Image: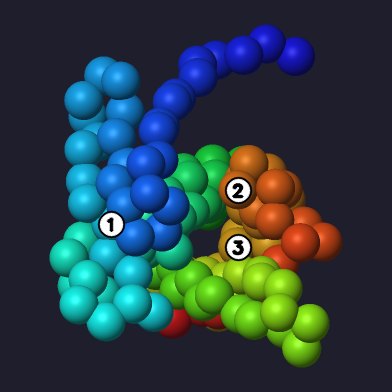
């Protein structure tokens, strides 16, 4: 294994605080949908994760499509990330990944999505820790 790159982010104040990176590419006040008054101040952690997961999975999707001999054009990936509280007060994530693959039939699109789910680093990270569902739009 070789490390391709490392990204760094620093949280101050947790879910209701700020998020920044030393290279200044990220410098944002977070919003918290669970806290009145700052719910729309900025993105919440789940929104940021949804964006990152959608982008990462989309890259894996394009690679999977190419590897399966079905390159896709003008595809879109939509990620919905929900924060779930269980009966014991613990938390987990529920993820729904939707892909729109124009010109590809639904069965082949699902094969591509499943292949992408096997190689996407975010999907690998989530295995066993969250519910991830795949949908063809």
What secondary structure is marked by label 2?
A: helix
Q: Residues under labels 1 and 3: Cα distance?
A: 31 Å
In front of the other: 65 or 19: 19
Q: Hey, which quadrant is residue 75 in on the image?
A: bottom left
Residue 1 in picture, x, y percent from top left: 75, 14
**Mark 2 touches mark 1? (CB < 8 Å):** no
Q: Position of residue 66 (x, y in %)?
A: 53, 43
- The disc placed on residue 113 is 3
- Within 10 Å of disc 3 (Cα), the crowding (few <14, some 14-19, many 20+) is many
Q: Which badge, 1 or 3, comes first in the chain's sequence?
A: 1
Look at mark 2 in the image and give the residue it sits on: 122
Q: CA distance from mark 3 to mark 2?
A: 14 Å
Residue, disc 1: 30
Residue at 66% of width from left, 71% of height from top?
A: 91
Disc 1 is placed on an element classified as: loop
N-terminal of the pair, mark 3 or mark 2, is 3
Query: Which residue lies at the image location 61% right of the left edge and 60% below the top edge?
Result: 112
| Apparent side of residue 40 relative to residue 70 in the rendered image (left or right) | left
Q: Residues within 10 Å of mark 1 (few under 14, many from 20)?
A: many
Determine if residue 115 is in view: no
- The vertical placement of 78 against 28, above or below, is below
């Amino acid at each position: 294994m070789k490390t391709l790159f490392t990204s760094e982010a620093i949280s101050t104040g947790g879910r209701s605080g700020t998020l920044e990176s030393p290279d200044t590419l990220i410098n944002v006040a977070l919003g918290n949908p669970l806290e009145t008054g700052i719910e729309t101040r900025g993105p919440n952690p789940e929104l940021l994760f949804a964006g990152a997961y959608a982008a990462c999975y989309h890259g894996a999707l394009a690679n999977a499509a190419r590897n399966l001999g079905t390159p896709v054009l003008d595809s879109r990936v939509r990620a919905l990330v929900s924060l779930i509280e269980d009966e014991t007060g613990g938390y987990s994530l529920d993820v729904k990944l939707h892909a729109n693959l124009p010109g590809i039939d639904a069965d082949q699109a699902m094969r591509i999505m499943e292949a992408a789910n096997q190689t996407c680093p975010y999907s690998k990270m989530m295995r066993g820790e969250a519910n991830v569902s795949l949908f063809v739009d």
